[in-house]
């Protein structure tokens, strides 16, 4: 049985959408057991009794706009997010899932769950849409901007194991996001990362990749620093939203356009699903000693269910231990 700790009060639409996602997940996956941390009275209207559902009451929750998360942690460890993380740290659950603020999850992860040995940084690693519908891992999506080249190599090793064990692709490839495809393109930092990836004994390096190829590239993992990765991720989100608005505008522009849209209804639905973040669920925070999944703050029940699915699949594949073993072997050879 996979045991998952959920922050019931994190997110823009908590606790209703979080509880909705929990119930969907329990009904969809028979091998998970979920413990939800939050205000029992506020969550009660949205939860049903279930043999694999447990509630831990706490009236405290971190505000999504909280600026000083470190101070909050030091003054009140009864926050729903922190209690759920501690539950995982103490060995009572295999994974943690929250739609709370990214900064709070990163801070709580560092103080409570702690970083994995041989991982010197933490990265946000969302699965982003791709032309072939398989999805690609982008990292770092914004957890850090202060990196050394070797930190990105550690992330590439972690992500390669996730692609192979969870996404079931036998030979994962890593691309380095850059301003050109030539080997010597980019900053000194990028050139050094390129050399490390090119000469790595276990990684399959695709080479440099320009951002314009993010949706169509055959590489499985897109690697960059947190500043660049966050810009790429938000540009994709904005472009998808803009395309949807333009498409709606053009459909409504005339009678023939509206008639044509009726015939293309299935194709348009598939397009929407291809660009919909709720189909993915959340982002993995790579580098912590346990599985940490960050769902989108605006997640509805369907999206949060998929975030729980991600945690389940990571635990089923025993990814954390496999990453530890790979990093240990790499360090011994270095």
Image (spheres, grey):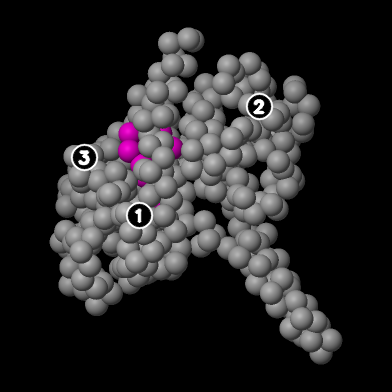
Residue located farthest toward the bottom when viewing the structure as drawn: 255
For the view shown, which residue lies furthest in the right direction?
A: 256
Query: For the point 21% across and 40% down, which residue is it?
Result: 91
Label pair 3/1, CB-CB below 8 angstroms:
no
Q: Which residue is mark 2?
A: 205
Which residue is found at the position 52% from the left and 21% from the top? Answer: 150
- The image position of residue 24, as x and y in percent, is 37, 67
- Residue 213 showing in the rendered view: yes
Image height of 57 relative to 253, above or below:
above
Q: CA distance from mark 2 to mark 3?
A: 36 Å
Residue for badge 3: 91
Q: Which residues are magenta?
A: 286-294
Q: Secondary structure at mark 3?
A: loop
Mark 3: give few (<14), some (14-19) or many (20+) Cα within 10 Å: few
Q: Is residue 219 left or right of residue 3?
A: right
Badge 2 or badge 3: first in the primary sequence: 3
**Corner quadrant of residue 9:** bottom left
Identify the mark at residue 98; answer none if there is no mark: 1
Q: Is residue 125 magenta?
A: no
Residue at the spot 72% in from the left edge and 36% down from the top edge: 209
Give the quarter of the image for residue 236: bottom right
Q: Estimate the spatial distance between the alpha carbons at disc 3 and disc 1, rounded to whole Å.
A: 18 Å
The tally of labels here is 3
Residue 18: mark in rendering: none
Q: Earlier in the sequence, mark 1 or mark 2?
A: 1
| Camera-nearest label, 3 or 1 | 3
Would you place residue 144 above or below residue 253 in this image?
above
Residue at the front extreme, as displayed: 30
Give the structural element (helix, strand or loop) at label 1: strand
- In the rendered image, residue 289 lying in the magenta stretch gets the answer yes
């Amino acid at each position: 049985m996979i045991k998952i700790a959920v922050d019931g009060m994190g997110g823009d639409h908590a606790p209703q959408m979080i509880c909705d996602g929990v119930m969907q997940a329990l009904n969809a996956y028979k091998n998970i057991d979920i413990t939800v941390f939050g205000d029992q009275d506020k969550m009660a209207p949205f939860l049903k009794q279930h043999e694999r559902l447990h509630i831990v009451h706490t009236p405290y929750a971190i505000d999504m706009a909280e600026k000083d998360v470190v101070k909050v942690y030091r003054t009140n460890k009864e926050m729903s997010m922190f209690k759920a993380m501690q539950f995982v740290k103490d060995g009572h659950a295999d994974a943690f899932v929250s739609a709370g603020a990214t900064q709070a999850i990163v801070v709580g992860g560092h103080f409570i769950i702690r970083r994995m040995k041989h991982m010197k940084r933490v990265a946000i690693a969302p699965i982003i849409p791709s032309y072939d519908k398989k999805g690609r891992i982008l990292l770092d999506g914004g957890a850090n901007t202060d990196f050394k080249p070797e930190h990105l190599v550690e992330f590439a090793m972690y992500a390669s194991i996730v692609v192979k064990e969870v996404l079931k692709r036998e030979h994962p490839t890593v691309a380095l996001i850059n301003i050109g495809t030539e080997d010597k393109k980019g900053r000194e930092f990028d050139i050094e990362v390129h050399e490390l990836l090119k000469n790595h004994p276990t990684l399959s390096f695709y080479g440099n990749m320009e951002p314009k190829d993010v949706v169509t590239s055959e590489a499985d993992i897109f690697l960059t620093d947190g500043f660049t990765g966050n810009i790429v991720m938000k540009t994709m989100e904005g472009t998808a939203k803009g395309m949807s608005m333009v498409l709606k505008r053009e459909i409504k522009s005339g009678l023939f356009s509206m008639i044509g849209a009726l015939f293309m209804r299935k194709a348009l639905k598939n397009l929407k699903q291809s660009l919909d973040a709720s189909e993915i669920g959340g982002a993995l925070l790579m580098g912590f000693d346990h599985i940490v999944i960050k769902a989108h703050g605006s997640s509805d029940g369907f999206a949060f269910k998929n975030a729980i699915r991600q945690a389940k699949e990571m635990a089923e594949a025993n990814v954390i231990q496999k990453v530890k073993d790979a990093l240990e072997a790499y360090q011994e050879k270095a």
